[in-house]
Image (spheres, rainbow, N blue to C red):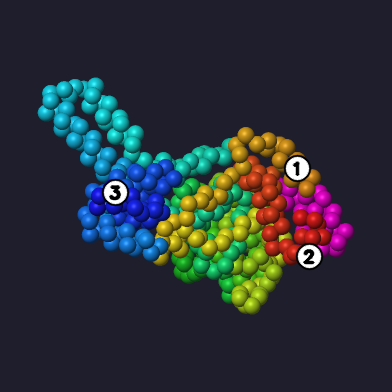
Amino acid sequence: MTPQQLDAYPKATLIRAARSLGWRGNEAQMSKSEFIDWLAPTPSDACSNALSAAAEGYTLTPAHKPASALPPADAASQMMQLIQAMAAGSLNEERVQEMIQAAVASINVPSPVVIAIAGFEPVTLPDGEHRHPMFEKCLRLAQSGINVLMVGPAGTGKTTLAKQIADALGLSFGALHCSAGVSESQLLGWLLPTGESGRFEYQAAQFSDLYQRGDSLFLLDEIDAADPNLLMVLNGALANGHLHVPQNINEPTVARGKRAYVMAAANTFGHGADMQYAGRTQLDAATLDRFYIVHIGYDANLERLLTGRESLSFRPWKPAPADSDYRADVIHLADWLDAVRLKASDSKLRRVISTRAYTKASQARQAGIPCHEIKEDLLAGWTRDELAKVAA
């Protein structure tokens, strides 16, 4: 199609058509004329089909095409200049270098994302893998040594998110799907008749093994369906830095290894069963106190990707500004917790504001979580009436 014909379409239609034909880039960085230049060399039939679909508001399944933000017309123009220069005999090394640099500068190559927390090794994330909008927040918290509890509806990708964090941090990954029938042995291990003449020997569970070895991330999936006795065993491992394993006579106390991270996933905030999640139990306040809660909602961009629609352009989650005053923020959070604790006590609320809340607030702020989010997260699951009583 000619540039004049393409110019008759709105820019939004041209963007959808370009995506149908394999374009991958940031539309905010390209003008309408650049999209016209990109689409013009496309065969008329393919371009017409893509434009017809785009005019109706949807995007066709993208054809296979190299993902480059360099419009074909620009590449063709540069190639023609090169050919003409060669034919005229005016080509020299300096001119070649100029043309190469111009071509490279015009290509939008995605840069890898780097997540850096003071005191920890920077994490470089390769471009191209789809991640949940709350991925960076959960990674920052986990890398800082905070036990993260992801709470959200079924099918929001909590298990996948935990596995992606383990991969990003170069950790071994393990998981336990909790239920009322899962015993403490799934955490501690077993005495089994595997020795000589049927002698009983200790066999570590995946949790105790990864917990002791370190460089690992273990996910307690569906933790709000777990047996209360299982969680009582877990509590010590989460807060005290060691796990008591009575089955292991030779080493009954296992120390938490370096970079042994624990995450959990739940569909409720630990209040027990409701109309949707009838198989859930109420979580003990001591267990909840050992976790930092992050709400995980549905990933709208993934849903659009799965259904062939145009992605939404937004930044999933943004950490606190790097130049913000960390010490002042931590003092502000501590003062706020003092007030919440006092009001909760005066109102006779059945809520725990322990010393761990202060520790979690400080660690989360150091991890780059903004103050207003830390306040929301520390009161996650509170009722409207409770929040009103503490004026939060």
Residue annotated with mark 3: 4
- Left or right: 383 with respect to 220? right
- Left or right: 365 with respect to 69? right
Q: Nearer the viewer, residue 112 or 159?
A: 112
Residue 88 vs 307, above or below: the answer is above
Is 374 one of the magenta-colored residues? no
Around disc 2, counting alpha carbons within 10 Å, would you say few (fewer than 14), some (14 to 19), or many (20 or more)? few
Q: Nearer the viewer, residue 9 or 82?
A: 9
Does the image show residue 19?
no
Q: Which residues are magenta?
A: 337-359
Residue annotated with mark 1: 332
Q: Could you say which quadrant of the image residue 350 lies in?
A: bottom right
Instruction: Tell me which numbered mark, 2 or 3, is placed earlier along the sequence.
Output: 3
What amino acid is at disc 2?
Answer: Asp
Across and down, in percent, residue 287 comes to 68, 61
Around disc 3, counting alpha carbons within 10 Å, would you say few (fewer than 14), some (14 to 19), or many (20 or more)? few
Residue annotated with mark 2: 385
Q: Please name which of the two marks, 3 or 1, marks the residue nearer to the observer.
A: 3
Instruction: Tell me which numbered mark, 1 or 2, is placed earlier along the sequence.
Output: 1
Residue 378 vs 306, above or below: the answer is above
At x 19%, y 35%, the residue is: 80
At x 33%, y 50%, the residue is: 7
- The quarter of the image holding the C terminus is bottom right
Tell me the SS state at disc 3. Answer: helix
